[in-house]
Image (cartoon, rainbow, N blue to C red):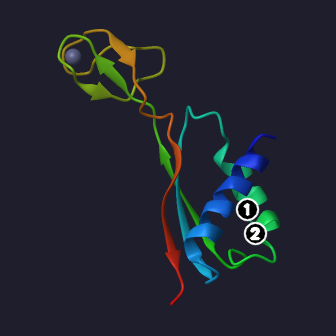
Amino acid sequence: MHEYPATVEIIKIAIEKSNGKYVKQINLVVGDLCGYVASSVELYFPIIAENTCCENAVLNIERIKPKLKCEKCGELFERELFSFLCKKCGGDGFPTDIGTEFFVRSIEIAD
Ligand SMILES: [Zn+2]
């Protein structure tokens, strides 16, 4: 349910940046570990955007898969199911911030 206020925020950002013009496209980045469900944001978007300058905007969501960092060789890698080991050297992988993103990357505004 916390996707609702998050989607309100996204639209607020777009309205501010568009300066009253119509917003054509909103490009959002959503990491798989960010705590927000991308499909819920997609669901709320048209409802919240109604009667705003975002009502005809296309919402593009770029999903980011989480990556681990190898403690030995520094390699960044997506983890396999049931494994935290580096694909390059077999070292232990540790969590990184990759996959926790949640932000508006860009907004396309009508001329
Ligand atoms: Zn490694």
**Which amino acid, by three-letter code, is at mark 2?**
Ala
Q: Check disc 1 and report the residue beneath it.
A: 45
Q: Closer to the camera, 51 or 43?
A: 51
Report the disc number at residue 49: 2
Spatial separation of the CA atoms under disc 1 and disc 2: 6 Å
Q: Closer to the camera, 13 or 34?
A: 13
- Determine crowd level at label 1: few under 14, some 14-19, many 20+ residues with C-alpha closer than 10 A: many
Q: Is mark 2 within 8 Å of ligand 1?
A: no
**Which amino acid, by three-letter code, is at mark 1?**
Phe
**Looking at the image, in which quadrant does ligand 1 appear?**
top left
Quadrant location of the N terminus?
Answer: top right
Q: Residue furthest bottom?
A: 111
Residue at figure coordinates x 68%, y 62% from the top left: 12
Q: Position of residue 57 (x, y in %)?
A: 64, 75
Q: Secondary structure at mark 1?
A: helix
| Figure check: 72 above or below 39 | above
**Relative to residue 25, is residue 1 drawn left or right?**
right
Q: Position of residue 20 (x, y in %)?
A: 64, 81
Q: Position of residue 14 (x, y in %)?
A: 61, 67
Q: Closer to the camera, 57 or 52?
A: 52
State yes or no: discs 1 and 2 in contact (Cβ < 8 Å).
Answer: yes
